[in-house]
Amino acid sequence: KNQVEQSPQSLIILEGKNCTLQCNYTVSPFSNLRWYKQDTGRGPVSLTIMTFSENTKSNGRYTATLDADTKQSSLHITASQLSDSASYICVVTLMYFNKFYFGSGTKLNVKP
Amino acid sequence: GAVVSQHPSRVICKSGTSVKIECRSLDFQATTMFWYRQFPKQSLMLMATSNEGSKATYEQGVEKDKFLINHASLTLSTLTVTSAHPEDSSFYICSARFTKGQNTEAFFGQGTRLTVV
């Protein structure tokens, strides 16, 4: 069964600290994996996209890693800011069928 | 990245009336668009897949007669919530599938907050 699981469900960190969010998936065959940021009351915005052959991808203070062998991805946020408070969603695309599988998201709260 | 525009961003309607939500891909053609529903503090739930020129494919448990989807052109899909009731109040989000080479990506609209009173 194709699934995407994210952890932790929620996270509270202090401003300026780093954090890492996890995404484990069983989707196969795998096409790509994307991390989205969703602010409350807004649509998700793409942060990174990685294909099978990519191990890491950065977008400013966001760095995503992918281990296709273990089917794990992480999103590392460096020097967190209050504006990083949002839900972060991992989405895996099923190859050939172009079907998307969503994780349930990690809600990050950055406190001053 | 590609832009998907969703309109309106907020709508309040009376119980029993119908509401139409538009989803447009502004700078690319989208043969496939998706409609999601999101309740507070929950993840996105796929309602239906909208294919240009053909009938939408609905997920299990989604009433196709209540949530009418029309994808008449390569840049526009609409979701009409018919005879809305307070339990239909939710955040509705569309996304459009963008394929370039072997990569497929989804771009999301800004979402529509529907409140049925």
Image (cartoon, coloured by chain):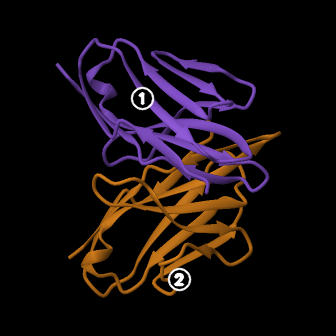
Q: Which residue is drawn at 25% across and 80% down?
A: B14
Read off the residue under disc 1. A21
- In the rendered structure, the colour chosen for chain A is purple
Q: Quadrant of residue B57?
A: bottom right
Q: Please rate how many residues cluster around mark 2, counting C-alpha atoms within 10 Å: few if below 14, some from 14 to 19, many from 20.
A: some
Q: Please rate how many residues cluster around mark 1, counting C-alpha atoms within 10 Å: few if below 14, some from 14 to 19, many from 20.
A: many
Mark 1, secondary structure of its residue: strand
Eyeballing the image, is A53 above or below B72?
above
Q: Residue at x 28, y 56 (%)?
A: B40
Eyeballing the image, is B12 above or below A4?
below
Q: Quadrant of residue A48?
A: top right
Give, as a three-letter code, the residue at label 1: Leu
Query: Residue B64: which numbered mark, if any?
Result: 2
Figure label count:
2
Give, as a three-letter code, the residue at label 2: Lys
Mark 2, secondary structure of its residue: loop
- Whole-Å distance between the Cαs marked 2 and 1? 36 Å
**Image spot of residue A76 (x, y percent):** 45, 20
Left or right: residue B58 versus residue A31 is left
- Can residue A51 be seen from the camera position used here? yes
- Chain letter behind tag 2: B
Q: Which residue is drawn at 49% across and 51% down?
A: B109
- Residue A43 versus residue B12: which sits nearer the camera? A43
- Can residue B4 be seen from the camera position used here? no
Q: Which of marks 2 and 1 is in front?
A: 1
Q: In which quarter of the image is residue A20?
A: top left
- Chain letter behind tag 1: A
Q: Which residue is drawn at 50% across and 36% down?
A: A23
**Image spot of residue A81 (x, y percent):** 30, 19
- In the rendered structure, the colour chosen for chain B is orange
Labels 2 and 1 touching (C-beta < 8 A): no
